[in-house]
Image (cartoon, rainbow, N blue to C red):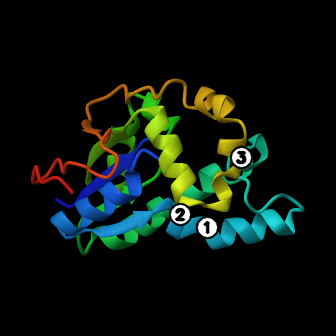
Amino acid sequence: MMKAFIVCGAPGAGKSTYGHQLAREVSATLIDIDVVSERLVRLALALSGKDPNDRDSHFFKDKFRTPIYEQMFDIAVDNLFLNHVVIVGPFTRELQDPDWPETLANRLQAEVIVHYVTCDPAIRKKRIQIRGHSRDRGKLKDWEEYLQYYQGENRPCFEHVLIDNNKEKCVKSSVTGKRY
């Protein structure tokens, strides 16, 4: 049976870096939320008369969040008949649904393994500042409000692989145990 590795956690925790490493290690197709959606989200926001850098408003979360995730899952289904997939995204709400892994496994017709990437807020903030994405300006503008949305980084309420990414530039693979 093919596997769908879900790499999730707060922005700046190191999801994309870890997801790339994991995809390489397990020879999987990588489906990263930013790569899948960024250009279309920017265009749609601009056409809606909204800030194309917005990723944190209620408007964005109400209108874009679900279709982006659904698109990622559609891409995963199209690839799972060939090989494993690694899907990278925050999945904040889903992490609090104890049935989500089973629901997703049924949809994808694959074994779902959730990897939760975490690190201290100060490290996340530094990483977000260093990467310099315009879509992160809202987070940095009101860091405390941003932290409230992630509610202290609540871990998934179901079985998962915990990736402690508190090293500034080092992450340990859960598959091979190597540090990068």
Q: Nearer the viewer, mark 3 or mark 1?
A: 3
- Name the amino acid type tagged 3: Gly
- Name the amino acid type tagged 2: Asp
Q: Position of residue 84 (x, y in %)?
A: 24, 65
Q: Residue at x 16, y 52 (%)?
A: 179
Q: Which tag, 2 or 3, sits closer to the chain's start?
A: 2
Which residue, given by chain and number where applicable, does mark 3 sit on? 138
Which residue, given by chain and number where applicable, does mark 2 sit on? 34
Which residue, given by chain and number where applicable, does mark 1 sit on? 38
In the rendered view of the protein, which quadrant contains the C terminus? Answer: bottom left
Check residue 174 in the rendering and tell me which mark sits there, or answer none.
none
Q: Residue at x 73, y 59 (%)?
A: 53
Q: Is residue 93 above or below residue 84?
A: above
Kindly check if marks 3 and 1 are in contact, taking CB atoms under 8 A apart as contact: no
Mark 2 → mark 3, Cα distance in angstroms? 16 Å
Kindly check if marks 1 and 2 are in contact, taking CB atoms under 8 A apart as contact: yes
Mark 3 surroundings within 10 Å by alpha-carbon count, few (fewer than 14), some (14 through 19), many (20 or more): some
Q: Relative to 38, is 142 on the left or the right?
A: right
Q: Residue at x 29, y 56 (%)?
A: 4
Residue 112 in view: yes
